[in-house]
Image (tube, rainbow, N blue to C red):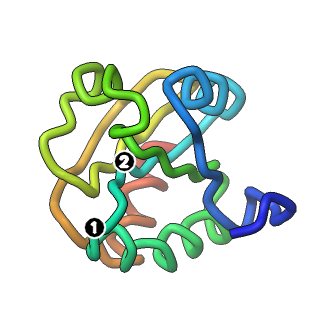
Amino acid sequence: MSDDESPTTRPTNLADEDALDEFVSGHDLALVEFYTEGCTICQSMEPVLGNVARETEAAVALVNPRDDPPLVDRFTVKSVPLFVLFVDGEPVDQRAEGFIGAEDLLSWVESAAA
C-alpha cells in the first residue's frame, strides 16, 4: 500500500504504540488489526478490512505488535489476527477468532457504533 492512499478506503499502517494511540484518539470509531509478517490469515483479512474501511464510518488500521512489544502485554495479544474495536479512543471489544468474514466483521463494527 502506498502512503498516498486514503485511509477511508484502505487500512492505515501504524508503526508503534504511540502511532496507535494517536490514531484511535483521532477517531470516534476505530478498528485495529494486530498482525504479524508471514501470517497467512492476516494477509487474507486485508481485503475484508478494505471493505470495512469503505463501508463504515470506522477508521481502520494495522499494527504489528512485534515492532513494539509492549503492545503484546497492553492488549493481551495471544494470537493473530487480533481485532480491537475502539470507541472515543478506548478499547471496547476484541476478537481473536482467525479469519472473520466481511459481513460478520461489518456487523460487529456497526454494533459498536450504535
| Rendering coords of residue 57 (x, y %) | 66, 53
Residue 93 pos. (x, y %): 30, 37
Amino acid tagged 1? Cys
Q: Residues within 10 Å of mark 2 (few under 14, many from 20)?
A: many
Q: Is residue 2 left or right of residue 92?
A: right
Q: Which residue is mark 2?
A: 34
**What residue is drawn where x is 41% and y is 51%?**
33
- Image: 18 above or below 46: above
- 108, above or below 88, in the image: below
| Quadrant hosting residue 11 | bottom right
Q: Which residue is depicted at the point 13% across and 41% down? A: 78
Position of 23 with respect to 113 (left or right) is right
- Residue depicted at 65% across the width and 52% down the height: 12
| Type of the residue with mark 2 | Phe
Which class describes the residues within 10 Å of circle 1: few (<14), some (14-19), or many (20+)? few
- Local secondary structure at mark 2: strand
Q: Residue under label 1, please give it.
A: 39
In the image: residue 27, left or right of residue 87: right
Most foreground residue, 18 or 61: 18
Q: Residue at x 68, y 69 (%)?
A: 1
Q: Is residue 59 above or below residue 93?
A: below
Which numbered circle lies on residue 62?
none
Q: Is residue 39 above or below residue 74?
A: below
Percent x, y of residue 88 = 58, 24
Q: CA distance from mark 1 to mark 2?
A: 11 Å
Q: Pointer 1 and pointer 2: residues touching (CB < 8 Å)?
A: no
